[in-house]
Image (spheres, rainbow, N blue to C red):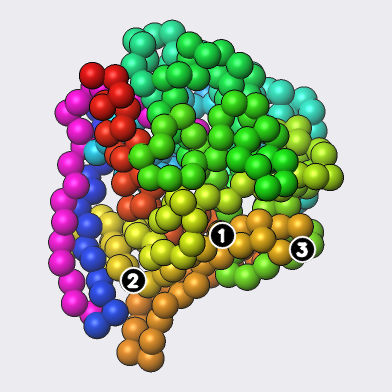
Amino acid sequence: MTSDPCRQELETTAITATGATSVSSPQPTTSTTFACFYVYGTVSEEPSVNADLRRGKAEIDSAEVQATPFSPVCQVYSPIYQQVTLADLEAHPDLNFGAAETVTAYDSIKAGFEDFIDHELDGRPFVVIGDSQGAAMLDMLLARLVDNVPALRSRLVMAIILGGNVEVPAGQLVGGTFKHIPACSHLGETGCVIAYSSFPSTPPADSLFDRPGQGVSLQSGQTASQGLQVVCVNPAALSGGAAALGAVFPSLGTLPTPWVSYPGLYTAQCQESDGASWLNVAKATGPADHRPTVTEQDGPLYGYHLSDLGLAQDNLVSDVAAAETTWTSDHP
């Protein structure tokens, strides 16, 4: 496209707790070594059950907000697909969509992924990134087309699956959603998945995320719950523990730069309780800190779902860069 939604300006104003500001200007990579495949979440505003294949404003905006940040570390590709629309989401608030519309969405993104592999990738190593319904689609794409194909799986640098309920046997790193692709456990690891959903406290019992066999799990056909847990990998500390998040959000015209970051505003740690496993996000605000903070925009069943990527944008991009460095050293 003339103005590629996956390759937009990334100039960012950082605002500290004291109000001090500084500006950085990350640049899209000119390297063709690594490719990223991005699948957007539920954004289509069409009245039908499944979207058509037109590039609408909602799809373009989603790519600009969630795909563009990765352009400094890879060439980003994002196919339009016949996703289940917001209208059908309203008809199925428990995320248990009908089989027909789910199959239509999956078959459509599968065609996009196969085209990416066959005609765009050209044997290169790749990263996959998905959010919400896009994450659920990636659960199925990786499980069916990559996980059991060693030649293709060996080229997977990293998977970032946010709000998609990647599941594993309790206490394990692999073996549920994927048989061979493990949860990441240290910085620089390759062939692994970063997955989480963020909440300010323990998710409700009927939460749509972070509990196996319900909510978003149903979008990818994961109905079992016994003996399973949802993967949580802290993007700011892949080996575990608490760490500061690198939160970056669109400035929405409030600043001269298109992006704004809030250093030190949030810390996060993976937690488990009452059958849930989630990324617990705490706001590190003091009485003099007047920076805006995220809220549970869609209510407690969603937590910070709409901000899953933005809350840790800098961390996720750095995680991909570290995995690519390892890949390069292992494949000179």
The residue tagged 3 is 274
Secondary structure found at label 1:
strand
**Residues under labels 2 and 3: Cα distance?**
29 Å
Circle 2 Cα neighbour tier, 10 Å, few/some/many (<14 / 14–19 / ≥20)? some
Dot 3: element: loop
Quadrant in which the N terminus is drawn: top left
Question: Mark 2 highlights which residue?
Answer: 264
Q: Mark 1 points at which residue?
A: 270
Q: Is residue 26 magenta?
A: yes
Magenta-drawn segment: 19-41
Contact (Cβ within 8 Å) of mark 1 with mark 3: no
Q: Which of 20 and 34 is in front in this view?
A: 34
Residue 186 on image: x %, y %: 43, 45
Q: What residue type is labelled 1?
A: Cys
- Name the kind of residue labelled 3 in the image: Asp
- In the displayed structure, 308 sits above or below 8; it is below
Closer to the N terminus: mark 2 or mark 1?
2
Q: Which residue is drawn at 26% across and 22% down?
A: 33
| Magenta segment, prevailing SS (helix, strand or loop) | loop
Residue 322, numbered circle: none
Q: Distance between the residues labelled 2 and 1?
A: 18 Å
| Quadrant where the C terminus is found in the figure | top left
- In the image, which is nearer the foreground, mark 2 or mark 1? 1
x and y, in percent, of residue 305 in the image: 57, 56
The reply, left or right, for residue 162 in relation to residue 33 is right
Out of 211 and 250, give the one closest to the viewer.
Answer: 211
Q: Is residue 211 above or below residue 52?
A: below
Q: Quadrant of residue 89?
A: top right
Of the residues shown, which amino acid type is indicated by label 2?
Gly
